Image (cartoon, rainbow, N blue to C red):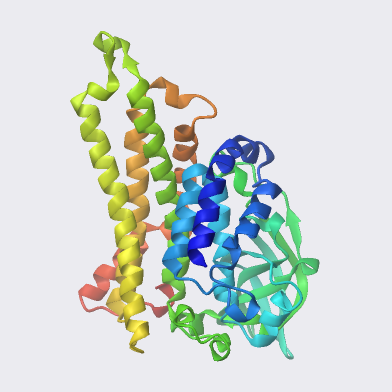
Amino acid sequence: MSQAVLDGVRDLLPTFRERADEAERLRVVPEASIKELEETGFFKLLQPKRFDGLESDPIDFYTAVRDIASACGSTGWVSSVVGVHPWQVALFTDEAQQAVWGSDTNTRLSSSYAPTGKAVVAEGGFQLSGKWSFSSGCDHCQWVLLGGLVCNAENQVVDFRTFMVPRENYEIVDVWDMVGLRGTGSNDIVVDDVFIPEAFTLSMGDTGRCFGPGQEHNTSDLYKLPFHSIFTGTITTPIIGMAMGAYEEHVEMQQKRTRAAYLGEKASLDPFAAVRIARASSEIDAAWALLVNNIREEQSYVAQAEKIPLKTRLKVRRDQVIGSQRAIDAIDALFEASGGRALATGTYLQRAWRDAHAGRVHAANDPERALQMFGAHEFGHKVDPGMY
């Protein structure tokens, strides 16, 4: 089934490429693109089978995202961050899952995990208020997953949770007007003192130890992988896809380009140009290979019912942030070597350059924190369990 989804996605790539300018103009992925992805089954790749999902290998999901982003960075980004949410919903209580998918298994969710909102303990749940930014694809979704600090009656922080909120209980504020990832519609979410039942929340402490009440019903090994491994991969993968798309366009451009400053020499005959694409392709391949290999390593531990070693989980984060940087470095090198034509509106290269640098500022791509955690653990120091 996953292969059918991948084939369907690849058939859509020319269309997504043609719609890239439209996405930027609208500042949101065109509704037609979301509908076409839905029809391929893409959004059900990580969804539980009991809700008409595919429970696919996460590498299949990442592969689809990579391919989509190679055609349109904004569409790839939204596909990734919206498409991964069924994986987390599968960890929530059965009551919460039924509320989301019980009547419509095509229901989608957006998110904003930074704990910028505040939740106060109430009987049977929490009172949630606040404003959250950067909820990519929220216009195409009927629920949102929001991060929030939980405070007790003395206003002391006692937990960090994810809150699942239905569309009627939040407002979308159209603020997204950026130079990169312009078509992602990553708008603000506002919640004004809404009661959230405890069953519709998930403690990040539990998530950090690969636990969720939904595992009682969703027993697949897919849902036993670490949250931070799966979710940070959804940020790096579209950037790798952007690099692949930039590479393909650069090679095509260079094969047609002549360089006036070098007496009309074909750019493809320049030995230094050949070296540049060799280096760029190696960086892209390395970023992808490490992402795949690290997920495979974690899957091997889960398959044997063994706890994933902390070092392995930290290695995933180490290679994830460096993978993003590798892909961006490749895009930078290709863009700089492409000549003035790459600056033209409508070229994939200039859009990939803008989109990748926009993706670079996502919190999941903070290199120093992820690398410091790995290094500190190697030196034998305690690492905050909430950060991996």
Nearer to us in this view, 60 or 196: 60
Q: Is residue 56 above or below residue 156?
A: above
Expressed as whole percent of the image width and height from the top left, the position of residue 86 reads 59, 71
Q: Is residue 24 above or below residue 84?
A: above
Q: Is residue 123 above or below residue 194?
A: below
Expressed as whole percent of the image width and height from the top left, the position of residue 323 reads 34, 55
Residue farthest along the top direction in this orientation = 263
Q: Is residue 133 visible?
A: no
Expressed as whole percent of the image width and height from the top left, the position of residue 151 reads 63, 81
Q: Is residue 249 visible?
A: yes
Hey, which quadrant is residue 321 in on the image?
bottom left
- Position of 190 with respect to 78 (left or right) is right
Quarter of the figure with the C terminus: bottom left
Nearer to us in this view, 102 or 283: 102
Q: Residue at x 26, y 72 (%)?
A: 376
Residue farthest along the right direction in this orientation = 168
Q: Residue at x 21, y 73 (%)?
A: 378
Hey, which quadrant is residue 208 in on the image?
bottom left
Q: Residue at x 44, y 34 (%)?
A: 349
- Position of 299 with respect to 238 (left or right) is left
- Position of 213 with respect to 299 (left or right) is right
Counting the numbered discs, the total is 0
Expressed as whole percent of the image width and height from the top left, the position of residue 170 reads 76, 65
